[in-house]
Image: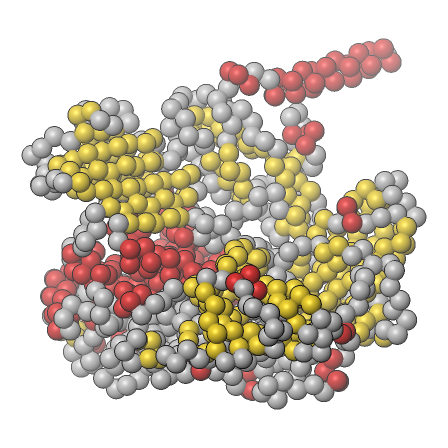
Amino acid sequence: MNFTMGFKNNFYLFVSVFAGILYFSCNDELIEQPKSLKVSEGFVNPIGFYDSIPTFSWQLPVSENIISQSAYRIVVASSPEMLSHNADLWDTQKQISGQSAWVKYEGEALKSRQKVFWQVKYYNQNDEASNWSAVQNFELGLLNNSDWQAQWIGLPTKEEGVLGSQDNIIHRPQYLRKGFELSNDVASARLYITAKGVFDVAINGEDLSDDVMPPGWTPYQKRIETLTYDVTDLIESGQNTIGVELAAGWHSGRLGWQKSYWNNTESPKLLLQLEITMKDGSKEVIISDETWKGTTKGPIRFADIYDGEIYDANFEMPNWTTNNFDDKNWTKVDVTSMDDNVKLEPKRHSTVKAKITLETKEIIKKNEAIIFDLKQNMVGVPFIKVPIIKGDTLKVRFAEMLSPDGSFYTKNYRSAQSTDYYIASKDGMIEYTPKFTFHGFRYVELSGFDTSKEPSKDWVTGIVQYSDFDENGTFTSSHEKLNQLQSNIVWGLRGNFFDIPTDCPQRDERMGWTGDAQVFGPTSLFNADVHKFWASWLQSVRESQYENGGIPFVVPDVLNNGKVSSGWGDVCTIIPWKIYYRTGDISILEENYEMMKKWVRHHQETSKNYISYMNSFADWLQPYPANGDNKGDTSHALIGTAFFAHSAKLTAKTAKVLGKTEEFEKYNALYKTVANAFEKEFFNNGEVKEVTATQTSYLLALAFGLLSEENRENAKKHLLEKIADVDNHLRTGFLGTPLLSEVLDATGEIDLMYKLLFNETYPSWFYSINQGATTIWERWNSYSKAEGFNPQRMNSLNHYAYGAIGEWIYERVAGIAPLEVGYKTIRIAPVPGGPLTNASATLNTPYGKVSSSWEIKGNSFFLDVTVPPNTSAIIEIPANTSEQFFVNGKAFKENENLKLKEKGKAFYKLFAQPGSYKFQTIIK
């Protein structure tokens, strides 16, 4: 009996090992493995991950024998060894499907701290199997409040009674530390940490990360994000020390331009839990509790987002995060229990990082101060390397532009002091970078340095900081100013994606204005990998939604005034749909659908007979308003009703995608009812009635499909008249501008859109470029060389809203657009226009990189295209179709990869399988 059992066990072991060998063998006979493996919204092997029900995505390699995917198999296990023969968490088996993105996990429930390993293989169009991918992993963070043993700790900084520039409470930065001893060798260690405030943490004298002002900004009364660090290599057997710098940040600092907005009465606090596994299997947990000590007598004497930082080197405490430091004069911390009403959740997008450095390009001497010009408006901090005399104070000021007399222009910073100070403890060259503040600037002014030394450009380097995302798309053309516009769009994105999407990065605001976000979202998705960024912020939008369904002006809602605005609150329907359409990620709709429904209900409750009476910022900052109002001339009721209909339509489309047929019918019927009411109230035979007719009033009606078919052509005629009446210039603000290119394109007026794009006089995109802009401005006329600065104090020179034109530039000038969600089917249809002789773009889709590059030479049009695997494309090429055209240097002949769909008078339309193609047509 024992012999038989032993034989069976050995036999099964042999079979298992043999199966494992087969699993990884025969690599030469299999096709190339999948690449670019990611979980959920684009995470690669994350630690401290937030998602216990992740999705899996991968891309097929570019290869001649790989056109599409016919099937896949995913295996998920609790160890890499188990993947090959016993995937204990999930094994999809072979699934007949072309889906290679957003495959939802359906395996065993995952828990806090769990490390998970996964692999995927695919089968190509011929059912040939690929090699297995490289082993990927993710490690979950602490998913529940109950996972925390730690307590909130900190010093009562409010009691110090320090007041700031606006008589606001100042919380001096805290220095907190704890020593602990381990008797065994460490196998692994994880530090879980967050703060009511912002922090920097070190262990045994070593900084843990290059994160900037973590944990970030959320609706703190609802949710605080936590971070996880692998600190295995920093923990030693024997004595250890943790040190944390803690500052007010967004939680306890001044936010907003009115004292009534400030909610900084609570002293900043730290929550920390260090979990250590020893090599003998035992565990140790070090937590924030009453055993910690702290002081506010460290070198950072003051730190504020708006006003800057004061660093006094006389207070430096060498080695304070190491074991060799005496903290006997430090005080014991206060301890506060956790509040279960505030969720602690792992951060669901990337932290802010220092991403780019900018060198000083020019030095300008101005009286006793020296100005360093970086030639680029940026967001972040300076790295200062300057000589100074003991006891002197280096003053560091910031500006986006200089006044005509060469002095700093800081009126647009309003009450934000935006000034850093460094107090020297000795003579010589000092190096300094602010830690708990950030600035929006192009120019840095230094005073208080050793004037016996000649200034040099290396005294100031700009450290550009933004949420840690990579470039997602590129665009360039033959036109220098169009390329500058693209650069301005990208720099506006970098400057205002600082943990949340802000309106501006320099003045006493820097808030998540919802209207700005909804108009710029699609353009941002082309330029940067910001899927996870938007998904995270939308969670904050959901958490900030009012009981009545309203969406605040800003998220997080620091204004806390209970007010809403049409076109602003509609971010909660527009951004989820835009993300879904460009990525194919259905989870963004699943997460936000209930919020969308509540917002539509709020629209309905603030309307009468389906005509909106909602408050509105309207077509914000429309140029030449007749009434001089920042809200422009377009009827608020017209705008509100248009967005009511649009949000109902998007909610209906979302319901349809989610398989909610009855709710689709309900919201689609509501959309049609509101559209009918809109047309009856505001239009007569396609012409605006009763209210002021503006470009935006016609754009909303046409873009949102609110007019009956027989009246659309007449509305278009009136729109064109409105544009012609002002010498073919735009008269649109925040809400109308993104719709201008969309409507003119859809109605066949591409030549006119090119005219508007390439206008150089006010108001136009090139106007600001002609005045020296290196970012998008808040106003079309924030500054002019002839008249100076706009007299309004609300005059940001880094404000991304008007950068929404980027969407049209990429989708029509370069010609890359989705025809099916997630770019599963791609439209490549560039339309040359204006003075352009070439343009090109690339875009990283969920399936790989697509590219479109065209050039006109003489009477020939050249178009180079790359279509990624597992997609297809409809390619439309301008041409004189009475002439032959060429593909890859040969006269076109249909084949299995390239087929003619349509031949018009001036274009060829082709269906293309994945691959690279070079087209040449005759256009004249």
Say which of 647 and 482 sits in front: 482
Left or right of 776: which side holds 327? right
* Picture residue at 67% right of the left edge, 66% below the top: 430
Residue 306: tell me if it is visible: no
Q: Quadrant of residue 920?
A: top left
Residue lying farthest to the front in this orientation? 452
Q: Is residue 286 above or below residue 110?
A: below
Q: Is residue 474 above or below residue 735?
A: above
Residue 102: x, y in percent? 49, 43
Number of numbered discs present? 0
Residue 753: x, y in percent? 20, 59
Q: Quadrant of residue 338?
A: bottom right
Say which of 364 and 15 sits in front: 364
Quadrant of the drawing holding the C terminus = top left
Say which of 692 and 771 sits in front: 771
Residue 832: tell me if it is visible: yes
Residue 612: x, y in percent? 32, 77
Q: Is residue 656 above or below residue 544?
A: above
Residue lying farthest to the right in this orientation? 183
